[in-house]
Image: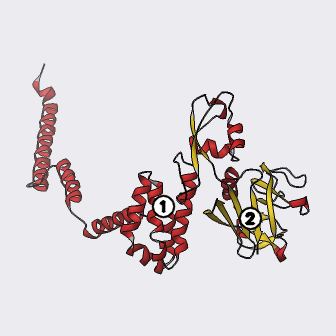
Amino acid sequence: MSYDKYKGYVGLAVVLTVLVAAGIVLSWKNYRTKFAGQSSPIEKTTEVKKESVKTPVTPFSFTGNKSSNIEKKSDEIPSGMAKEKAKDTGTSKEIEKYSAELASAKKLEDEKDLIGAKRAYKNLLNSFSKPEIVQKEIYRLNIALLFSPQLTEPPDGPKSEIYTVKASDTIEGIAKKYNTTVDLIMLSNGIKNPRTIQIADRYKVINDEFSIIVSRSKNTLTLLAGSIVMKEYAVGTGAYDKTPLGDYKIRNKIPEPPWKGIPYGDPKNVLGTRWMGLINEGDTVQGYGIHGTWEPETIGKNVSQGCIRMLNEEVEELFKIMSVGAKVKIIE
């Protein structure tokens, strides 16, 4: 094979090899020049992230700490008071002034010492320019105590005692014996199913008389246990004095009541979620009662046809407490 035949190809290969080698050398020099004295790209990224974490941003840190302090203070007072504090500057100052006492009351409540918490709030009643703010907390604890297994005696709460279940006892029978409600016995004892009670079970029962006073001029309903004011509710009463004054008793109790043939749940049914009908001596005043409403904006006003309106959640609470035959007095 003659060398002269292929020498052109050999020369071309040599030239191409030299050019490739020169390109590699040039690229290496450019790389060294660009990145000389620097970290690799991966290391650089890591360093940037590390610096961003380590560098403190003082304003953010301060705001975060301040926010945490506010949340901590809010946790030391009841949610109702926190709302009042946000609404009124004067109330806010008073809450701050007695923050230690309020925190102590809240701590007692968190520890399930409801009577101790209630007494702590009572000690603060005369310290506030708006004592009704503190009174609401006392009312709230009154109902919490009522629905709890804790026994009470006046003045801390209604008279209560322990009842031991006997053969053939039923929750309905026990409620009738003490003139109380099945709901109240079940709630205060954590009973889920009334058919599960057994002989020798011991249950808290209220052995006191619940009654109601309605003021149509103040639009309030006051719940009493004996002489103890348990809670005051805002209500709506009749326009133009249509709510009749006098002494009544609860005639009947109907959950999810129909109204004038209109079933419960129909938008035209105005009775809300509960109905407690009223009857007076001789049954001379008929058709009146205490009921819920789908129009909460009417509470506190004289707008009804004579019945006493309550917020649905509040009439449901009262419904669990009041028994048929309980006294209701309507005053001016």
Secondary structure at badge 1 equals helix
Which sits in the foreground, 239 or 246? 246
Q: Amino acid at mark 1?
A: Lys
- The quarter of the image holding the N terminus is top left
Q: Amino acid at mark 2?
A: Glu
Residue 151 versus residue 108 in the image, above or below: above
- Residue at the (66%, 58%) spot, across then down: 314
Q: Using a 10 Å C-alpha cutoff, classify the residue at mark 2 as few (fewer than 14 neighbours), some (14 to 19) or many (20 or more).
A: few
Closer mark to the observer between disc 2 and disc 1: 1
Q: How is the image coloured?
A: secondary structure
Instruction: Estimate the spatial distance between the alpha carbons at disc 2 and disc 1, rounded to whole Å.
Output: 32 Å
Q: Position of residue 176 (x, y in %)?
A: 72, 42
Q: Quickly name the residue at label 2.
A: 295
Q: Position of residue 119 (x, y in %)?
A: 46, 63
Asked whether, in this view, residue 47 is left or right of residue 134, the answer is: left
Quarter of the image where one finds residue 233: bottom right
Q: Position of residue 228 (x, y in %)?
A: 60, 62
